[in-house]
Amino acid sequence: MQGRKLAVWLLVAASLAATGVQAQTVRAQGPRAQYKPPPAAPRQPYNSMARDTTPFNCEQYRRHPHPGMVGFCEGLERSTLQQEARRQGRPGPSSSVIALPPMGSAEARELGHACIGGQAMRRLANGWEQVMAREGGWQRCRGG
């Protein structure tokens, strides 16, 4: 009888130990999380020069009664564009805006320079190169 009691106690002890191990395994896995898609790519920062390098259109103030209005507008536009480029880590635009013929015109072919999307470009043998201004930054232009 003594041997039988010992066998029962050993069986009970072994089953309790096995239950504890099994419970720990289930708890370690925990509930399964729902599928979470990867985050979307970050949006590109705003670029006010995307369509035109003179977004303030300061030419509209040529007929303004105050003679300094065009200069004020151009200075404000220049500082705004340069600050935006600096904040976004891009090369800044030039302070000056020059007149160039549009790409594809006879004058642009003869000159070797053209205004493409408000940026002054120089013709190369295999494409176009962006022109840098003397005062620094890429050269802005009108005409293209």
Image: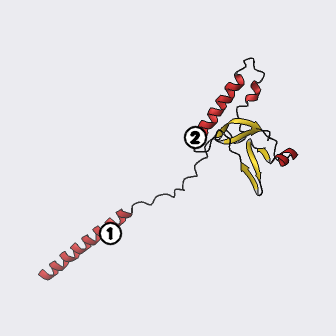
Mark 1: amino acid: Gln
- The type of colouring in the image is secondary structure
Q: Earlier in the sequence, mark 1 or mark 2?
A: 1
**Residue 1 shows in the view:** no
Whether 80 is among the magenta residues is: no
Question: Mark on residue 86?
Answer: 2
**Residue 108 shows in the view:** yes
Q: Residue at x 75, y 37 (%)?
A: 98
| Farthest residue, direction front | 134
Quarter of the figure with residue 58: top right
Return the residue nearer the eye: 63 or 125: 125
| Farthest residue, direction left | 2
Residue 49 in picture, x, y percent from top left: 68, 40
Q: Residue at x 24, y 74 (%)?
A: 14
Secondary structure of the magenta portion, mostly?
loop
Q: Residue at x 46, y 58 (%)?
A: 33
Q: Is 3 above or below relative to 76?
A: below
Mark 2: amino acid: Arg
Q: Which residues are magenta?
A: 36-40
Q: Is 39 above or below relative to 72?
A: below
- Mark 1 surroundings: few (<14), some (14-19) or many (≥20) residues within 10 A: few
Residue 75 in picture, x, y percent from top left: 65, 29
Residue 91 in picture, x, y percent from top left: 62, 44
Asked if residue 1 lies left or right of residue 120, the reply is: left
- Mark 2 surroundings: few (<14), some (14-19) or many (≥20) residues within 10 A: few
Whether 37 is among the magenta residues is: yes
Task: Return the residue at label 1.
Answer: 22
Return the residue nearer the eye: 86 or 14: 86
